[in-house]
Structures are given as C-alpha cells and as structure tokens.
Amino acid sequence: MRHSISVVYLIVSGAIFIAACASQDPRDPGIEYAPQMYHSIPLEPYSQIDYHQYTPDGKHLLSPVQGTVARKKISYFYPFPNTNEGYEEAGKKLTNPLPKTPENVAEGKRLYELYCIHCHGEKGDGQGSIVQAGKFPPPPSYYGVQLRDLPEGKMFHSITYGKNLMGSHASQLSPEERWKVIMYVQELRKAGLAQQEGAQVSNPDGYNKKSLQKK
Ligand code: HEC
C-alpha cells in the first residue's frame, strides 16, 4: 500500500514538473507557485513583468528627458557638433580646464603611450611602429607646418570624434584623460619645434663654409 502511494506521488509530481517546463518560450517561467510572493505588486523601478498604464511608454522607470546629463558627468557634455563649423568653433572657444601640473603631463604621457604612440610615434613626428611597418600612412607631425599652430580645442574635437583615418577615442579616454593627453602632445610639439630651431642654428651650411675656408 505504501509502495503504491509513493508511485502515485512520483507520477503526479513528475507530471507537474514536466507541465511546469513545457512551454516553448525560453523566457516563460512555466507554472509559478504563488507568483505574488515574488512579483512585486508595487511598481519596482528596476524590475518589470508587464506593461502598465501609468506612464506614457508603459515603463516603471521613466526615461530621462533628452539632453539629460548624469551627475558628475557634466564633462561628457560636448556642445560642438561633428561638423566643420563645430570643429572651427571648438578651436576658438574650447580650452583645457585642467592645470598643467607635472602629474597631469605624466598621466598624459602614459595614455599617449597606450593609445597614440603606434601611429604618431614616440616624438609625435608621425613615425609610429605601424607606420614604420608600412601598415598605415604617416599621420602629420605635431610640429610640422600642418599641426604646429593647431589650437587645443581642435585637438580635443578631433580626439573626441576622430578625423579622417584617425578614429574617435571618446570610448577609450574620458574628457579629462583627453585633456591630459593633449598636454603631452603639446610637450612633444614644443620639444620638436625646439629641436628644429636648434637644427637651423647649427645649420650644416655654416659648417661647410668653414671647412671650405680651411682648405
Ligand atoms: C590609427 C592611427 C592613429 C591613432 C591611434 C591616433 N591617431 Fe591621431 N591622427 C592620425 C591621423 C592619420 C591623423 C591625420 C588626420 C587628418 O588630418 O587627416 C591624425 C591627426 C591627429 C591630430 C590632429 C587633428 C587635427 O584636427 O588636425 C591630433 C591632435 C592627434 N591625431 C592626436 C592623437 C592622439 C592624442 C591620439 C591618442 C589618443 C591619436 N591621435 C591616436 C592617426 C592616429
């Protein structure tokens, strides 16, 4: 007798088990026991079973209004559009908000060596490793004619949106990090310009003249 009860029990519980899993929809939880126990009746902002009628889009958690900036993320708000006009305007209006401290420049160098050096080169002359390997055309030198007067606002704009062959670095670098990297780019440019001037002062012509005079 006890034996047949347990067989019936097994069959019934097996049937319930199979019925509970029978749905084809992988998101269907099947038969739920007392669902009110774990599906909250009050509206929970981060969990939702069904659409409801209280908000326009039927969501518990209202979407933020367009243009909303998250707390402490105000630096991510960038007013200049990805157009030529936006680029020009950024060049005129945008300046580095961070102080030029040795720590900031050092962090800029660290980031440059992570994200930029393989294209722009150790000295910023556009001779990075992938350029030397012949895989990528050389970017312009930071201290060449094209970029030596480039304002920092335009640099920020180009790093944020990318420019031609250079991709956007907005997802790799926070706005603060972009400004730090720009400080280091400016240091490279200063060093490159100083070296160019030095090269002009000790120009090989003068040396040749002297050596000619000696003869
Ligand atoms: C895949 C190679 C590549 C990487 C990586 C790269 N750049 Fe560039 N960069 C270029 C090229 C190519 C140009 C020239 C774009 C043009 O004017 O057509 C350029 C242009 C620039 C300019 C001049 C932009 C302007 O407005 O004329 C700056 C400044 C610059 N890069 C900084 C950086 C910094 C900082 C990083 C790292 C965060 C970086 N680049 C990473 C290839 C690269």
Image (cartoon, grey):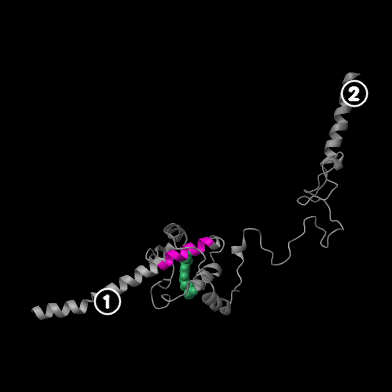
Residues at discs 1 and 2 in contact (Cβ within 8 Å): no
Q: Secondary structure at mark 2?
A: helix
Count of numbered circles in the view = 2
For the record, the magenta segment spans 176-186
Q: Is residue 170 left or right of residue 49?
A: left
Q: Residue at x 21, y 76 (%)?
A: 204
Which quarter of the rendered picture does the C terminus lie within? bottom left
Q: Residue at x 13, y 77 (%)?
A: 211
Nearest the eye: 120 or 26:
120
How crowded pointer 1 is (Cα within 10 Å; few <14, some 14-19, many 20+) is rated as: few
Magenta stretch secondary structure, dominant: helix
Which circle, 1 or 2, is nearer the viewer?
Answer: 1
* Residue 200 disc label: 1
Q: Which residue is mark 2?
A: 5
**Residue 125 visible:** no
Q: Is residue 6 left or right of residue 105?
A: right
Q: Position of residue 30 (x, y in %)?
A: 83, 43
Rounded to the nearest whole Å, what is the CA distance between mark 1 and mark 2? 103 Å
Nearest the eye: 95 or 5:
95
Three-letter code for the amino acid on which mark 2 is drawn:
Ile
Q: Is residue 61 left or right of residue 89?
A: right
Q: Secondary structure at mark 1?
A: helix
